[in-house]
C-alpha cells in the first residue's frame, strides 16, 4: 500500500514537471513566433519606407525651380495608403523653413552676431530662455572662451555629473541642444519645431518659415501669430515674399536680407509605416542640388 502511494506521488510529480515543460516550450515558441513576425514586419516596413523616400525624391525633382512654397505638390502630405498588412503615410517638410542652428557661427566657426540676434528673438517668441543662444554658440565655435554673460565652455561641462566637454563642432541633429547645462525636455520642446541642423550658410525660406520665425525676422514689424490667416495667404503661393518683408519692416530688412530667400535645397521626408501591430517611422534628410537628390542622413523612431 505504501509503495502504491509513493508511486502515485511520483506520477503526480512527473505530470506536473511535464506540464511545466510543455507550458514553457509553448510560451517560448509563441515568443519566437512573435519575435520573428516583428522582425519580418520591421524589414518590410524599412523597404516600404525606402520606397516612399525614393518617391519623395522624385517629387522634388519635378518641382518648379522658381520658388519653394506650401502651395506646391511636394508640400501636400501623402494620405494613408494601403500596403500588405497595413498602411503607409508620409510628408515632406522644408527644413529651410526653420532656423539653422549651425548658422550661429560662420564657416570659420566664429560668432555670427546677426544670426545670434535672430535666434535670441526666436527664443523670446517661443517662450524659451535667451541664454540658450550664447550656450549654443559656445557648443559650435572653435574657441574655448565662453560667451558673455551666458556662455558655457569646458569649465562648465566638466562640472556636470557625469562630466563631459563642449562639442566645439557643428551639430548634425537638433537634439544636441539637450546637452546644454540646464536644458530640460520641456524647454527643448518649445524650441525643437523651429530649428534645424544644416550646413552653415543656408537661408531661411520665407515661403515656408513657421510663424514664430517670421515674427523673429521682422522684429515686431508684423504680426504672424494668426495661423489661419498665414495659411490662407499661402494657399496660392509664396507669402511673405522678400518684397513683402521689406514693406513690413523697411528699417530692419537690410540686416536680414542676406540670409532670407524663397528657395530651398534641404528637405526632410517623414515616412510612417504600420504593419499589423508594428509601427516604423523613417526620417530622411534630403539635399537637392539642381535635379540631383541625395539622402544625407536617415534616422528611425526619433527625429
Image (tube, grey):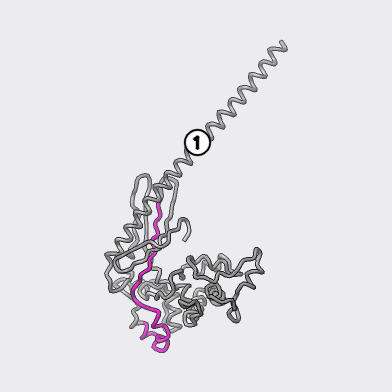
Q: Nearer the viewer, residue 80 or 39?
A: 39
For the N terminus, the image quarter is: top right
Q: Nearer the viewer, residue 48 or 235?
A: 48
Q: Residue at x 43, y 69 (%)?
A: 198
Instruction: Give the answer, above or below, for where 60 lies relative to 244.
Output: above
Q: Nearer the viewer, residue 142 or 214?
A: 142
Other residues around mark 1 within 10 Å, as few (<14) / some (14–19) / many (≥20): few
Residue 79 in the image: x percent, y percent?
34, 56
Residue 217 in the image: x percent, y percent?
43, 80
**Magenta region, residue range:** 245-273
Q: Residue at x 68, y 12 (%)?
A: 4
Q: Is residue 250 magenta?
A: yes
Q: Is residue 231 magenta?
A: no
Mark 1: secondary structure: helix
Residue 249 in the image: x percent, y percent?
40, 86
Residue 61 in the image: x percent, y percent?
29, 64
Amino acid at each position: 500500500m505504501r509503495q502504491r502511494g509513493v508511486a502515485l506521488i511520483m506520477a503526480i510529480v512527473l505530470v506536473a514537471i511535464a506540464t511545466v515543460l510543455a507550458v514553457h516550450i509553448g510560451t517560448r515558441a509563441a515568443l519566437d513566433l512573435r519575435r520573428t513576425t516583428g522582425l519580418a514586419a520591421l524589414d518590410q516596413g524599412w523597404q516600404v519606407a525606402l520606397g516612399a523616400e525614393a518617391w519623395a525624391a522624385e517629387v522634388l525633382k519635378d518641382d518648379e525651380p522658381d520658388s519653394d512654397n506650401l502651395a506646391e505638390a511636394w508640400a501636400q502630405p501623402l494620405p494613408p495608403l494601403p500596403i500588405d498588412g497595413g498602411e503607409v503615410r508620409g510628408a515632406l517638410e522644408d527644413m529651410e523653413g526653420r532656423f539653422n542652428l549651425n548658422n550661429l557661427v560662420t564657416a570659420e566657426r566664429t560668432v555670427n552676431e546677426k544670426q545670434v540676434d535672430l535666434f535670441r528673438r526666436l527664443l523670446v517668441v517661443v517662450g524659451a530662455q535667451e541664454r540658450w543662444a550664447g550656450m549654443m554658440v559656445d557648443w559650435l565655435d572653435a574657441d574655448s572662451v565662453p560667451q558673455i554673460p551666458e556662455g558655457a565652455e569646458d569649465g562648465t561641462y566638466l562640472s556636470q555629473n557625469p562630466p563631459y566637454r563642449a562639442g566645439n563642432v557643428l551639430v548634425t541633429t537638433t537634439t544636441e541642444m539637450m546637452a546644454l547645462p540646464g536644458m530640460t525636455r520641456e524647454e527643448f520642446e518649445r524650441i525643437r519645431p523651429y530649428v534645424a541642423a544644416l550646413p552653415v550658410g543656408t537661408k531661411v525660406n520665407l515661403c515656408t518659415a513657421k510663424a514664430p520665425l517670421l515674427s523673429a525676422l521682422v522684429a515686431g514689424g508684423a504680426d504672424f501669430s494668426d495661423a489661419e490667416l498665414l495659411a490662407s495667404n499661402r494657399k496660392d503661393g509664396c507669402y511673405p515674399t522678400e518684397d513683402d518683408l521689406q514693406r513690413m519692416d523697411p528699417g530692419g530688412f537690410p540686416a536680414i536680407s542676406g540670409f532670407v530667400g524663397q528657395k530651398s535645397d534641404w528637405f526632410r521626408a517623414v515616412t510612417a509605416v504600420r504593419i499589423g501591430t508594428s509601427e516604423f517611422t523613417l526620417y530622411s534628410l534630403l539635399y537637392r542640388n539642381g535635379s540631383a537628390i541625395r539622402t544625407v542622413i536617415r534616422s528611425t523612431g526619433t527625429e
